[in-house]
Image (cartoon, rainbow, N blue to C red):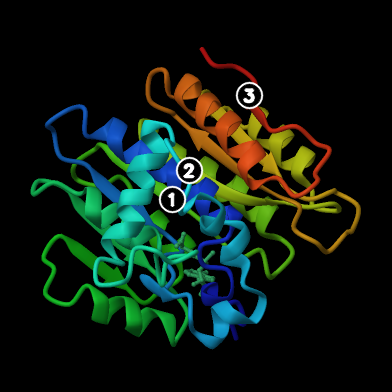
């Protein structure tokens, strides 16, 4: 049984880091008219109410979207992200400290979609998947699958458009996700070597992150870029201290764009971490 519910974490610092990166990747794909496909293997439940019991439990959104919501003169990428969050709050008062609703990755991607593009969503949880299906009912550009995202990814690649992005955003509940991810990414990349893959992972003491990076470095996959932000000190084994994203096949000059955004985000989200943000290529970029 799956116990993770994204409602507890919606709009936290991880979502901020991940969703801004996601938007930048989709915007890069839109530089060409040719259609693209966005595949979200662990989609969650679309829209989150930050006043719900889940979100109110630890109010994680306060140190995520709450830190940006009323910020003055943000850079263009951040302003665009804030407009996207504002769109799902259009009926709410503007003077709130935090937004009432927070869009998950499927809703963010949907807002950026053009008529020629398509979205495929996968979600395994028995409560979340029906909510996701309901949200996208009658949307002919979005298909929702109540299934295992790892299995589904293997079945769906390559998409007919041969252009696009896969977001892999697992819950890391089982303990073997990092190893499994490396295998899944190698398999996916062999089936679709030109696809863009964005993979979120927890930056946390005790997690095999170096091993994960080394395995990817030695995997034969060529272009891999990473962005990591730490927000609290890395002193406790079971506490999430930061957010990491691996991007396979980042678009041209995406490294420079993401560096700037990561540099801007770091002090805004920081809560006493002594570890600087990190953006780097993993291994061979040729
Ligand atoms: N991507 C979402 C976003 O950014 O808004 C958040 C997703 S949340 C981190 C991970 C989701 O994956 C949860 O909703 C969980 O129920 C779902 N999940 C867990 N294991 C899964 C699996 N094997 N296949 C598909 N979904 C899974």
Residue at point 29%, 40% (across, down) = 164
- Residue under circle 2? 198
Disc nearer the start of the sequence (3/2): 2
* Quadrant housing residue 224: top right
Q: Callout 3: 10 Å neighbours few (<14), some, many (20+)?
A: few
Q: Which of 77 and 210 is in front in this view?
A: 77
Residue 144 spot, x, y in % from top left: 28, 70
Pick out the residue farthest to the front.
95
Q: Which of 185 and 237 is in front in this view?
A: 237
Residue at point 57%, 50% (across, down) = 200
Residue 35 spot, x, y in % from top left: 15, 40
Quick check: can you spot residue 192? no
* Quadrant housing residue 46: bottom left
Residue 228 spot, x, y in % from top left: 65, 38
- Residue under circle 1? 167
Q: Callout 1: 10 Å neighbours few (<14), some, many (20+)?
A: many
Q: Callout 2: 10 Å neighbours few (<14), some, many (20+)?
A: many
Quick check: can you spot residue 217? yes
* Above or below for 249 versus 56: above
Disc nearer the start of the sequence (1/2): 1
């Amino acid at each position: 049984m799956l116990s993770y519910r994204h409602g507890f974490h919606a709009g936290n610092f991880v979502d901020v880091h991940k969703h801004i990166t996601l938007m930048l990747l989709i915007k890069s794909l839109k530089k060409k008219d040719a259609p693209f496909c966005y595949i979200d293997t662990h989609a969650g439940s679309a829209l989150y109410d930050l006043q719900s019991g889940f979100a109110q439990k630890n109010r994680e959104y306060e140190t995520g979207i709450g830190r940006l919501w009323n910020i003055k003169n943000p850079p263009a990428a951040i302003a665009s992200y804030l407009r996207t969050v504002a769109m799902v709050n259009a009926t709410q008062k503007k003077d709130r400290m935090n937004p009432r609703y927070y869009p998950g990755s499927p809703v963010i991607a949907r807002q950026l979609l053009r008529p020629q593009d398509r979205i495929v969503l996968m979600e395994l949880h028995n409560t979340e998947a029906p909510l996701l299906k309901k949200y996208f009912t009658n949307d002919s550009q979005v298909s929702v699958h109540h299934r295992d995202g790892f299995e589904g990814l293997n079945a769906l690649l390559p998409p007919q458009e041969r252009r696009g992005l896969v977001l892999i955003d697992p819950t890391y509940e089982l303990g073997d996700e990092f190893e499994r991810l490396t295998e899944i990414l190698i398999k996916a990349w062999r089936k679709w070597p030109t696809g863009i893959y964005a993979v979120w992972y927890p930056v946390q003491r005790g997690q095999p992150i170096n091993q994960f990076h080394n395995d990817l470095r030695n995997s034969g996959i060529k272009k891999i870029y990473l962005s990591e932000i730490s927000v609290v000190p890395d002193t406790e084994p079971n506490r999430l201290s930061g957010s990491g994203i691996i991007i396979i096949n980042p678009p041209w000059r995406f490294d420079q764009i993401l560096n700037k955004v990561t540099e801007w985000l770091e002090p805004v989200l920081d809560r006493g971490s002594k570890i600087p943000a990190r953006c780097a290529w993993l291994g061979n970029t040729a």
